Image (cartoon, grey):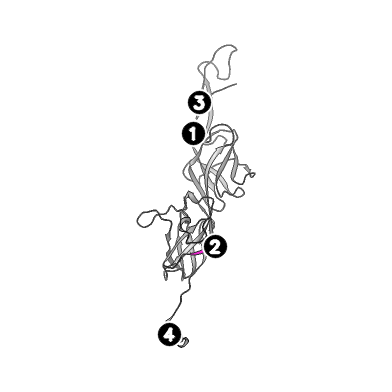
């Protein structure tokens, strides 16, 4: 047994290190929001967040009660050093102007879209510590469907059509959309958009394209509030249009009553099964 005199005599050989994550920042978008499938660069700082300790972290879902509830660890699309899928990330440490910080780049999976996740951090081999004040809301677009009749991926030039965009954690008051004819969301595109805020679970938009990008699929670029635009290659519109009507004989804008006349239609997206009326 130790008595107080022995403990005091030995105290000069006993020391404690205190560690705590005190801040999390991001250099792109919001630190509290991430888009499914997009790497979110996060930087952590605080006492002990340095190469003095090793660091590992993961996020837990809304259903978890503690960091020890490992069945509720949020799904990531990251891989470890061996190329195997992992939901637990090792923290890399750097120093800038004498200050140490840790960095990770989680890529959240579609399984946690719409959830608000909480951070669990481990110093060395200690237990993971829950930081309820550091949360990330995971958002994504899942689908875009037509509210009108017709195909979900077809729009007729100069004809307005309403589409419903659904997903996880969409913010209908701040999110923005545009379409690109390439794989680059920085391209200039023009689209008329009106928002319908009647349903908190979807973003309804009225789209009209005027003489633009004939025959070129237009891919959705979606801006989740403060995040950069995200390209959704599986969600696109084909803009169809008639450019010209010709006839095999005579003027294409003249027809004689009770006389058959053949017309030919030229444009983008014209296909067998189309119908015409006058």
Instruction: Please name whichever residue, 247 or 16, is drawn nearer the observer in this view of the structure.
Output: 16
Measured from the top left, where is residue 106 in percent x and y? 46, 56
Instruction: Please name whichever residue, 271 or 212, is drawn nearer the observer in this view of the structure.
Output: 271
Residues packed near mark 1 inside 10 Å, few (<14), some (14 to 19) or many (20 plus): some
Circle 2 SS class: strand
Q: Residue furthest top?
A: 258
The residue to which callout 2 is attached is 132
The residue under the point 54% across, 40% down is: 144
Which callout, 1 or 3, points at the residue further toward the start of the chain? 1
Circle 1 SS class: loop
The residue under the point 34% across, 56% down is: 82
As measured in the structure, the alpha-carbon distance from the residue carrying label 4 to the one carrying label 3 is 93 Å
As measured in the structure, the alpha-carbon distance from the residue carrying label 3 to the one carrying label 2 is 61 Å
Circle 3 SS class: strand
The residue to which callout 3 is attached is 266
The residue under the point 54% across, 62% down is: 132
Q: Are marks 4 and 3 in contact (CB under 8 Å)?
A: no
Measured from the top left, where is residue 155 in percent x and y? 55, 34
Measured from the top left, where is residue 9 in percent x and y? 44, 87
The residue to which callout 4 is attached is 10
Q: Say above or below: 118 vs 249.
A: below
Residues packed near mark 4 inside 10 Å, few (<14), some (14 to 19) or many (20 plus): few
Left or right of 161: which side holds 89? left
């Amino acid at each position: 047994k130790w008595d107080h005199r022995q403990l005091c005599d030995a105290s000069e050989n006993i020391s404690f290190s205190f560690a705590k994550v005190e801040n999390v920042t991001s250099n792109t978008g919001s630190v509290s929001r991430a888009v499914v499938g997009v790497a979110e660069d996060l930087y952590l700082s605080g006492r002990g967040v340095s190469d003095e300790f090793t660091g590992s972290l993961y996020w837990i879902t809304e259903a978890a009660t503690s960091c020890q509830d490992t069945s509720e660890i949020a799904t990531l699309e990251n891989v470890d050093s061996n190329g195997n899928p992992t939901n637990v990330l090792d923290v890399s440490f750097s120093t800038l102007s004498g200050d140490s910080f840790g960095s990770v780049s989680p890529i959240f999976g579609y399984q946690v879209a719409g959830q608000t996740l909480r951070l669990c951090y481990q110093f060395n081999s200690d237990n993971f510590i829950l930081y309820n004040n550091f949360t990330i809301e995971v958002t994504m677009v899942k689908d875009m469907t037509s509210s009108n009749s017709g195909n979900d991926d077809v729009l007729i030039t100069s004809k307005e059509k309403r589409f419903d965009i659904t997903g996880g954690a969409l913010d209908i008051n701040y999110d923005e959309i545009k379409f690109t004819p390439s794989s680059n969301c920085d391209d200039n595109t023009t689209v008329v958009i009106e928002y319908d805020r009647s349903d908190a679970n979807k973003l309804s938009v009225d789209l009209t394209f005027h003489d633009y990008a004939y025959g070129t699929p237009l891919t959705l670029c979606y801006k989740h509030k403060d995040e950069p635009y995200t390209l959704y290659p599986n969600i696109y519109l084909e803009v169809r249009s008639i450019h010209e009507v010709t006839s095999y004989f005579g003027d294409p804008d003249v027809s004689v009553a009770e006389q058959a006349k053949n017309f030919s239609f030229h444009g983008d997206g014209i296909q067998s099964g189309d119908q015409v009326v006058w």
